[in-house]
Image (tube, rainbow, N blue to C red):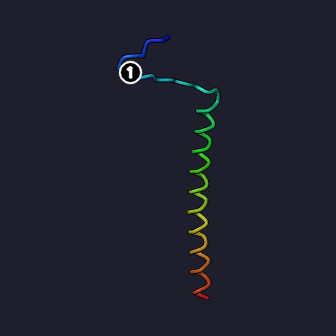
Amino acid sequence: MDKPLGKSSGEITIDVHLDGLDEQLAKAYELVETIEKARSLADDLAKGVNSIKLEL
């Protein structure tokens, strides 16, 4: 029968690099930034259109 293990402490670090994952994450962040910029521009455009309508 196996002997019980004594108390111990330790740390295990697993460093995994998946091919292409970093590039895909960078592209995803870039896409989010592009969408946020497009949303901001659309909001500005909508405000401009509303402003023109009010002047007419």
Q: Secondary structure at mark 1?
A: loop
Q: Which residue occupies 41% across, 16% down?
A: 5
As displayed, is residue 53 above or below residue 16? below
Front-most of residues 8 and 53 = 8
Quarter occupied by residue 39: bottom right
As displayed, is residue 23 above or below residue 3? below
Front-most of residues 55 and 2 = 2
Q: Quadrant of the C terminus?
A: bottom right
As displayed, is residue 8 above or below residue 52? above
Front-most of residues 49 and 33 = 33
Q: Which residue occupies 57% across, 45% down?
A: 29
Q: Amino acid at mark 1?
A: Gly
Quarter occupied by residue 38: bottom right
Residue 35 is situated, as x and y percent measured from the top left of the image, at 61, 55
Residue 33 is situated, as x and y percent measured from the top left of the image, at 56, 51
Q: Seen in the image, is 15 located left or right of residue 21?
A: left
The residue to which callout 1 is attached is: 10
Q: Which residue occupies 64% across, 26% down?
A: 19
Q: Which residue sits furthest bottom?
A: 56
Numbered circles on residues, count: 1
User: Local crowd at mark 1 within 10 Å, few (<14), some, or many (≥20)?
Assistant: few
Residue 23 is situated, as x and y percent measured from the top left of the image, at 61, 34
Q: Which residue occupies 62% across, 27% down?
A: 18
